[in-house]
Image (cartoon, rainbow, N blue to C red):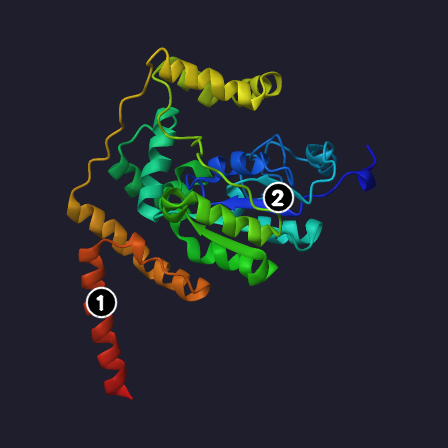
């Protein structure tokens, strides 16, 4: 393989996990000016994560050997955002690519993350106990899969990419805005990438948490990545999607909801943990994240902010 003939990526979807990155990956993959690697989540630039699909530079460059004349060459790995090393590693190898970050209400993201791991039979605890155990698990070196709330502490993660690549090269999208008005958000993304916009009348959602109700298969596939990787190589992604949709829609095989039994007060208490980080994120990005904060909590937070302002005026 002659590296000089293979284009390096100039675009990365870096996260956050469970925030619509897979859906966006498949949408952008269809654009004639965009080449997205067939392998999603190569995780090549994560030195501080347990799991990488690709471990050497030659193999990584091989993801882009089929690039023709596409202007944008990219890949999507959600662990890059959470990783402490990915941004600097990308900078070292790629210099100044475009970075796209999707962010979701951190509590809803945590719920989705938990359900995903629960359906894969990787999580044995209920949500409340899993959250209590999270700090201990992190200290013991448990993987990204169990960092339910910490993955949603976005401020330091986003700041790392802005500091590394500059604001003009980093685009932040809210999951909630994307699902509400995908045409508007996709237009913004195409402008950010400086390519011709496409009209998308309808989009399909991928990687939803409603996995198949075949527990033994879920357990087996969740614990045997090599088999997953082999199947992905021999069955094209579009064919895999058709198979899954056929099973869900034609055979009516679905997974019952995994309940997250938290009282309103417990949810509010969890939200309160995210509030300082959300406010710092807003100051950093100059974006409005108030959509993430429940109204009664926002009212309570405003009282606290007003008290702080009065105190600061008094001590002046």
Residue 180: which disc? none
- Locate the C terminus by quadrant: bottom left
Label 1, residues with CA under 10 Å away: few <14, some 14-19, many ≥20:
few
Write the residue at 31% across / 38% down.
111
- In the depicted structure, whether residue 297 falls above or below residue 231: below
Q: How many marks?
A: 2
Quickly name the residue at label 2.
Answer: 45
Relative image position of residue 46 (x, y in whole percent): 58, 43
Secondary element at image label 1: helix
Q: Secondary structure beneath disc 2?
A: loop
Q: Nearer the viewer, residue 227 or 206?
A: 206
Q: Nearer the viewer, mark 1 or mark 2?
A: 1
**N-terminal-most mark, 1 or 2:** 2
Is 30 displayed left or right of 247 in the figure? Answer: right
Residue appearing at x 43%, y 36% in the figure? 145
- Tell me if mark 2 has few (under 14), some (14-19) or many (20+) residues whose alpha carbon lies within 10 angstroms of its own: many
The residue lying at 19 percent from left, 40 percent from top is 262
Above-or-below relation of 171 to 55: below
Q: Position of residue 65 (x, y in %)?
A: 74, 33
From where the camera sits, is residue 230 visible? yes
Residue corresponding to mark 1: 302
Residue under the image location 72 percent in, 37 percent down: 61
């Amino acid at each position: 393989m002659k590296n000089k003939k293979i284009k390096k990526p100039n675009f990365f979807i870096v996260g956050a996990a469970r925030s619509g990155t897979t859906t966006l990956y498949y949408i952008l993959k269809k654009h004639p000016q965009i080449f997205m690697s067939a392998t999603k989540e190569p995780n090549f630039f994560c030195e501080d994560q347990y799991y990488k699909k690709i471990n050497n530079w030659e193999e990584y460059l091989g993801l882009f050997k089929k690039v023709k004349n596409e202007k944008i060459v990219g890949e999507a790995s959600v662990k890059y955002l959470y990783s402490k090393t990915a941004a600097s590693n990308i900078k070292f190898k790629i210099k100044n690519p475009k970075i796209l970050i999707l962010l979701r209400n951190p509590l809803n993201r945590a719920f989705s993350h938990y359900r995903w791991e629960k359906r894969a039979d990787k999580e044995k605890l209920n949500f409340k106990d899993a959250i209590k155990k999270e700090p201990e698990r992190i200290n013991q070196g448990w993987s990204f899969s169990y960092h339910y709330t910490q993955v949603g502490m976005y401020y330091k993660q986003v700041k790392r990419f802005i500091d590394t690549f500059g604001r003009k090269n980093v685009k932040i999208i809210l999951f909630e805005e994307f699902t509400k008005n995908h045409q508007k958000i996709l237009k913004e993304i195409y402008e950010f990438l400086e390519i011709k916009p496409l009209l998308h009348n309808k989009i399909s959602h991928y990687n939803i948490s409603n996995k198949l109700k075949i527990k033994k298969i879920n357990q087996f596939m969740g614990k045997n990545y090599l088999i997953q990787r082999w199947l992905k190589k021999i069955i094209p992604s579009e064919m895999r999607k058709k198979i899954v949709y056929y099973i869900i829609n034609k055979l009516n095989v679905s997974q019952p909801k995994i309940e997250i039994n938290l009282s309103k007060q417990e949810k509010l208490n969890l939200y309160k943990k995210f509030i300082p980080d959300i406010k710092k994120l807003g100051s950093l990005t100059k974006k409005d994240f108030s959509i993430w904060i429940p109204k009664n909590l926002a009212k309570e937070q405003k009282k606290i902010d007003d008290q702080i302002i009065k105190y600061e005026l008094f001590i002046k």
